Amino acid sequence: MKSSDLRLLLTASGSRRLLSVGIFAAVMWATILIANAVLIAEVIIGIISHAPGVNHSIILLALLWVLRALFNAGFEHWTSSQAVTIKRNLRNSTTSKVATYSGTSPAQLSTVLTKGLNGLDIYLGRFIPQMIFASIVPFAVMATMFLEDRLSAFIALVTLPLIPFFGALIGRYSADSVARKWQSLGTLSRYFEDSLRGFATLKIFGRSHSQSKRIGVMGQKYTDETMQVLKISFISAFALELVATISVAVVAVSVGLRLVSGSMDFKPALIVLILAPEVYFPVRNAASLFHAS
């Protein structure tokens, strides 16, 4: 996240509430994930060993799943509504001071107030909360893994930076495509504005049809730039998914070999295997949402 983006976020009305609630939600989510892994391990071991308290663990696990679903749905709904509120406040603040933007092209200003602010829905409603989750959840999960198996926690700690590393490499490449996309949209908006202003003159000299064709060509260029950005986003999602899958596989192979050799107990192995994907998912999802936003 750029410092200018964070500064804009903190100055917007309602943004600090989004950050504080996001931190609380990330801590709660990490607690739910850890409790879920422990309960699943206890249920599996209880069923295998015919332990008397397994029914109690199953009931707790079912209640935890209900809580997890309600918490996830409620938090996503709240962040979406909060993003709409922040976006509305930013739009009202900009339109109330529109006279100060006299040096800005009306087409460019309208693009910012429509396309630009509409893009904040995903940025504020999903990317920012996911960035908070990516900053807290993986480390809480790795701390639990460290208590159960230090080697698995060390593998996760070493492989976790690969996801933001590859995400940054792809992001540097996609930044140029995104810039070209917005440049094409700005050019199209300004050209369309100039054409509307001079439409009567163009009609008199019989040049209105050529202008419509020109606008069509520029619109197609904007479409091509957008498709290029989408292609890069799909490639980045595949690359991040591949890195996360390989990282989880390394942890699983390490746990499996030690489990077969008898140097590791079954319950810690189950807990580590269940928690391993949760180390990488928040970071991977944040990288994907960055391209989407």
Image (cartoon, grey):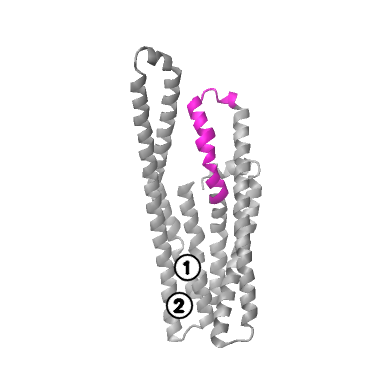
Q: Label 2 to label 1, Cα distance in Å?
A: 12 Å
Q: Is residue 99 magenta?
A: yes
Residue 255, disc:
2
Q: Residue furthest top?
A: 204
The quadrant holding residue 62 is: bottom right
- Locate residue 171, reporting x and y percent: 42, 49
Q: Nearer the viewer, mark 2 or mark 1?
A: 2
Q: Which residue is found at the position 60% from the left and 57% from the top? A: 73
The reply to whether residue 176 is visible in this rendering is: no
Tell me the residue that label 1 is attached to. Answer: 156
Tell me the SS state at disc 1: helix
Q: Which residue is found at the position 56% from the left and 62% from the top? A: 137
When the figure is inspected, residue 74 is found, relative to residue 11, above or below; the finding is below
Graded by Cα atoms within 10 Å as few (under 14), some (14 to 19) or many (20 or more), the crowding at tag 1 reads many
| Label whose residue precedes the other's in the sequence (2 or 1) | 1
The quadrant holding residue 22 is: bottom right
Region rendered in magenta: 98-126
Tell which of 65 and 225 is nearer to you. 65
Q: Which residue is found at the position 48% from the left and 67% from the top? A: 277
Residue 139, disc:
none
Prevailing SS of the magenta stretch? helix
The reply to whether residue 140 is visible in this rendering is: yes
Tell which of 166 and 89 is nearer to you. 89
Tell me the SS state at disc 2: helix
Q: Is residue 171 magenta?
A: no
When the figure is inspected, residue 150 is found, relative to residue 115, above or below; the finding is below
When the figure is inspected, residue 269 is found, relative to residue 188, above or below; the finding is below
Q: Which residue is found at the position 40% from the left and 13% from the top? A: 201
- Locate residue 110, reporting x and y percent: 52, 30
